[in-house]
Image (cartoon, rainbow, N blue to C red):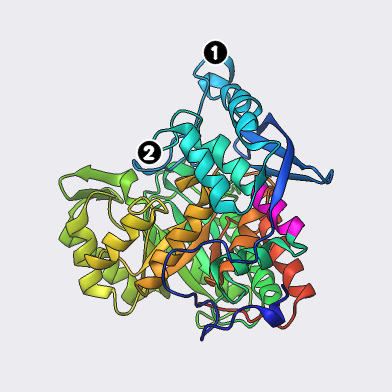
Amino acid sequence: MSEATAPQTGQPGATPSGAAGDPPNDVGLTIASLRAEQVLDSRGWPTVSVALTLDDGSVHEASAPAGASTGAFEAVESRDEGEEFSGRGVLKAVAGIEGEIAARLTDRRWDGIRALDDALRDLDGTPNLARLGANAVVAVSMAASRAFAHVSGVALYEWIAAQTGAQPLMPVPHFNVLNGGAHAANDLDFQEFMIAPLGLVSEEQAVRAGSEIYHALQSAVRDEFHTAGLGDEGGFAPPIANPVQALDLLVAAIEAAGYTTDQVKIALDPAANGFSLGDGNYQVGGRRLDRRELVDYYDGLLGDYPIWSIEDGFAEDDFEGWQLMFDRVGSSTQLVGDDLYVTDAARIREGAEKHYSNAALIKVNQIGTVSQTFDAIAAARENDMACMVSHRSGETIDAFIADLVVGTGVGQIKSGAPARGERVAKYNRLMSIERRQPQLQYGLH
């Protein structure tokens, strides 16, 4: 299927209601072998890499990302817990792929990704993939998706569009250029300060803006702090503690690079689990705030800075805080749930019903399989919620999420700073898709 024949369902990125599933004309495949190995992610910790060989001899690879800031309800990784790598080795997960998983998946025909993913979950037998490990299962599911695209004779993003009934769309990248929280060794409570080129007209222009602003910010950080140290996601991590300092640096960098705050907005991921004191209280910049005071604090930032999106502004279990924030600014600001939803369709539906947020973050390894990721996006769309596809702090050069965001047409992605190989692999893939398919629109869903 090409973009010219992709389903037209109204506005770009729209999808039919109901759970995403395999289209009637999905092409089946037979897996001849499944191999895995332990490799390093961008934080220097082990992760799982998979090579899936079909009976036609083609090989399809994928590797699992890993998060540092994780939600309590995420699918569970398998870690060896031995002496090597401080217990973070993944040799048990590798053995499970080459043993149980290979025995279940090879030498039989699979007619769709959902059937294969269901088999993986049934084999694991736990609700959170704790036995085989979400890192093992997600790597196999991603590699199998590439294999299904191959036998269908289309690019991965085109196959994803067919699975989800979406119109492919080039997304607005959200570059995490200042790091704090669990991603940096500074005292900044908020975890991510991102720039989002909402007012530009193409992926290539957006990536250029991200790069130019990143380097303008680098100069400012070096001049003021005499350092240009980086956090886990490639953003700068200067010795600051006040979010206002970070926002001032961003606005100055946007303008120094020759852009306006109409062209490039700011997005925040405070990751409030990291500075929650419990019982609806939080510690921000040395100040203790209750949930109502935190809403006031965010509202003040929204009034003073060109912030368009706030992710995880409250802890994953502070439902009252989420509702207070939604009631105050939900009509004018994108409020994204990450730890709140963990890419789970049922949790997203509940959040929509109870007015926790108007958007959901999408991470394949949070839920564990590609087909469940499709379901999470479908659940959000059924409830008029936006989606943002996301990387993890521990990444590899696998650019699966670039195809995922284009194919599902959700219009937003975050993959860290426009620097470091594991981050730019995703942005480079997006630009490559756009160059090959220049008719694709750029922008939000």
Mark nearer the N terminus (1 vs 2): 1
User: Which residue is outermost to the right?
Assistant: 57
127 or 45: nearer the viewer: 127
The residue that label 1 is drawn on is 83
* Residue type, mark 2 in image: Pro
126 or 322: nearer the viewer: 126
Give the label, 1 or 2, closer to the camera: 2
The residue that label 2 is drawn on is 127
Q: Residues within 10 Å of mark 1 (few under 14, many from 20)?
A: few
Is residue 149 inside the magenta stretch?
Answer: yes
* Residue type, mark 1 in image: Glu
Rendered-image quadrant of the N terminus: bottom right
User: Which residue is outermost to the bottom?
Assistant: 10
Residue 146 screen position, x and y as percent = 70, 53
User: Which residue is outermost to the top?
Assistant: 83
132 or 49: nearer the viewer: 132
345 or 99: nearer the viewer: 99
Q: Secondary structure at mark 1?
A: loop
Is residue 78 inside the magenta stretch?
Answer: no
Q: Is residue 237 visible?
A: no
Q: Alpha-carbon distance for marks 1 and 2?
A: 28 Å
Q: Is residue 417 visible?
A: yes
Q: Which residues are magenta?
A: 144-151
Residue 106 screen position, x and y as percent = 68, 36
Q: Secondary structure at mark 2?
A: loop
Q: Which quarter of the picture shows residue 34?
A: top right
Q: Which quarter of the picture shows residue 414?
A: bottom right
Q: Is residue 415 above or below residue 203?
A: above
Q: Residues within 10 Å of mark 2 (few under 14, many from 20)?
A: few
Residue 67 screen position, x and y as percent = 49, 42
